[in-house]
Amino acid sequence: MPEELTSLLHRQTEGNPLFMIAVLEHMLEAGLVEHDQGGWRLRCSASEVAVQVPETLRQMIGAQIDAAERARSSAFWRSPRSPA
């Protein structure tokens, strides 16, 4: 993988593997990178790439936030409370 692409991925994802995969898949779908038997290649310069949070990653984060909120709410209602 070219240094320019690895630097871009690391900068955009802070090295988080889950985010790296999602961003790379997004870049591939958007035609910003290509992959063939020779490896990965940027189709434009890294400075031209404006990486946004892919929709799949937004949905994944949203689902985790929703699950955490449901767990917190459920724990609240199950915990013993003292009379006011």
Image: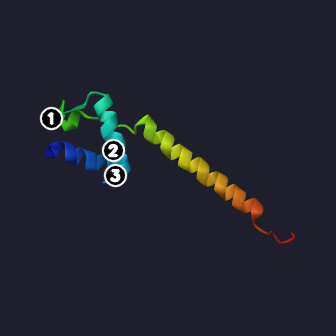
Q: Secondary structure at mark 2?
A: helix
Q: Nearer the viewer, residue 54 or 50?
A: 54
**Residue 40 placed where, x, y %?**
18, 38
Specify few, some or many for label 3: CA neighbours under 10 Å numbering under 14, 14-19, or 20 or more.
few
Way the structure is coloured = rainbow
The reply to whether discs 2 and 3 touch (Cβ–Cβ < 8 Å) is yes
The reply to whether discs 3 and 1 touch (Cβ–Cβ < 8 Å) is no
Question: Considering only order in the chain, which callout, 1 or 3, is on the residue closer to the N terminus?
Answer: 3
Residue 45 lies left or right of residue 27; in this view the side is left
Q: CA distance from mark 2 to mark 3?
A: 6 Å
Type of amino acid under label 1: Gln
The extreme left residue here reads 38
Q: Secondary structure at mark 1?
A: loop
Q: CA distance from mark 1 to mark 2?
A: 19 Å
- Hey, which quadrant is residue 82 in on the image? bottom right
- Hey, which quadrant is residue 77 in on the image? bottom right
- Give the residue at mark 2: 21
- Give the residue at mark 3: 17
Q: Nearer the viewer, residue 84 or 14?
A: 14
Residue 19 lies left or right of residue 67; in this view the side is left
- The residue positioned 33% from the left and 49% from the top of the image is 13
**Residue 66 placed where, x, y %?**
60, 47
Which of pointers 1 and 2 indicates the residue nearer the eye?
1
* 82, above or below 38, in the image: below
- Give the residue at mark 1: 37
* 74, above or below 8, in the image: below
- The residue positioned 37% from the left and 37% from the top of the image is 52
